[in-house]
Image (cartoon, rainbow, N blue to C red):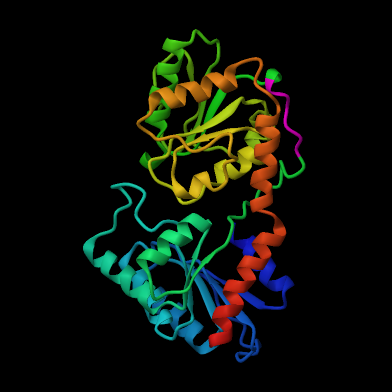
Amino acid sequence: MRSNYLRILEEAGFECFLVTSKSHFDPDIDLFHKSKVVDLQVSARRKIGTLFTIYKQIAAFRPNLIICDIPSRVPQCLLVFFLCISKLGLVAIDDVVPHDKHDAPSKLVSIMQALIVRQSAGILTFSSNSAELAKKKFKDKSVFAVPLITEISTFSNATPVPQNQKKNFAMIGRWSEYKGFDIGADIFDTYLKKHQSGSVLDVWCSGIDSPMFDHPNIVWRSTKSFTWQDLSKVLPTYKAVLMPYRSASQSGVQNLSWDAGVPCLVSDLAGLVELQPAHLPGIPLGDIDAWTQALFALDNQGAPDEIAIVGQAFSRSIRSKENVVNSFLVAVETVVGRS
């Protein structure tokens, strides 16, 4: 994902460098180039000594701007904090609050994250709704909303398959509690009890070793890993993708599903409803009747093709290249202009 943002900057004339745990700057590089941007991506398992070396390199390099995620471990927090002291850090955050209890940081990390935000030159979020939430929490910070870019262009020119030719439903993603795979299974099970549908829920879930559900109408498609290329042929044939997330500020699954012309049924979370057309609003997690009614409407053979066509066009309009480029360049140029 991040490489796409760097390409935007390079096309705009910025000199960009990707810094990882193994990076070493070329000594011939002009250390005082006026449009240098560093994208900092450091493994969470790097040792303090390695991180200190990276810090010295970047400090000597004197870039105009450093873009990085808010770290979740103490060593990386220290590295980013010292870089942000110079007001160079444009910090990217996915959410204002942790996704779930497994993502909640320790007290020490929480304090360090707060210090990083306080010292940063600005905050990037990936949806306008999330930006509004961040502005309320970080009132003295410049907050920028930049639409999420997905790497996969497989479906960029896809025309939706007619709804009456589609089969089944799907849930897709890496296993994490906040993605609500268990909730989706309960919703689908309830739906089948109310409506004797012949549909099946395909679960494409990576990151765990064994199926979570034992139900004849829930099919476990993956237990270790898969790629979007693996799904490129089957994804456009689904009637809808279920996303009963407990927490989210954006979702690559949602973006790619709409690109493939597949309707998404999502929780009523700020970052998700932003990409939903008016005829498919977010659904409260606790309203099982609303979820089953939404499934029934899309499972019906008479479901209009406009459900997918309008949603696809709406999602793409928000994430158009022009919108992404303009909003990202405004963020970067605003912060660089202050340095």
- Residue at 48 percent across and 10 percent down: it is 195
* Outermost residue to the front: 278
Q: Position of residue 277 (x, y in %)?
A: 60, 40
Q: Is residue 78 above or below residue 3?
A: below
* Outermost residue to the top: 196
The secondary structure that most of the magenta stretch takes on is loop
Q: Position of residue 236 (x, y in %)?
A: 67, 30
* Outermost residue to the left: 107
Q: Is residue 2 above or below residue 122?
A: above
- Residue at 51 percent across and 44 percent down: it is 273
Given residues 146 and 238, the one toward you in this image is 146
Left or right: 168 in relation to 78: right
- Is residue 159 a member of the stretch shown in magenta? yes
Q: Position of residue 112 (x, y in %)?
A: 30, 71
Q: Is residue 104 above or below residue 230?
A: below
The reply to whether residue 49 is visible in this rendering is: no
- Is residue 146 a member of the stretch shown in magenta? no
Given residues 46 and 108, the one toward you in this image is 108
**If the image is split into quadrants, where does the N terminus sit?**
bottom right
Left or right: 156 in relation to 238: right
- Residue at 39 percent across and 84 percent down: it is 85
Given residues 222 and 288, the one toward you in this image is 288
* Outermost residue to the bottom: 32
The reply to whether residue 150 is visible in this rendering is: yes
- Residue at 58 percent across and 85 percent down: it is 337
Left or right: 52 in relation to 197: left
Q: Position of residue 75 (x, y in %)?
A: 34, 70
The magenta span reads 158-163
Give the total number of marks visible in the rendering: 0
Q: Is residue 79 above or below residue 108?
A: below
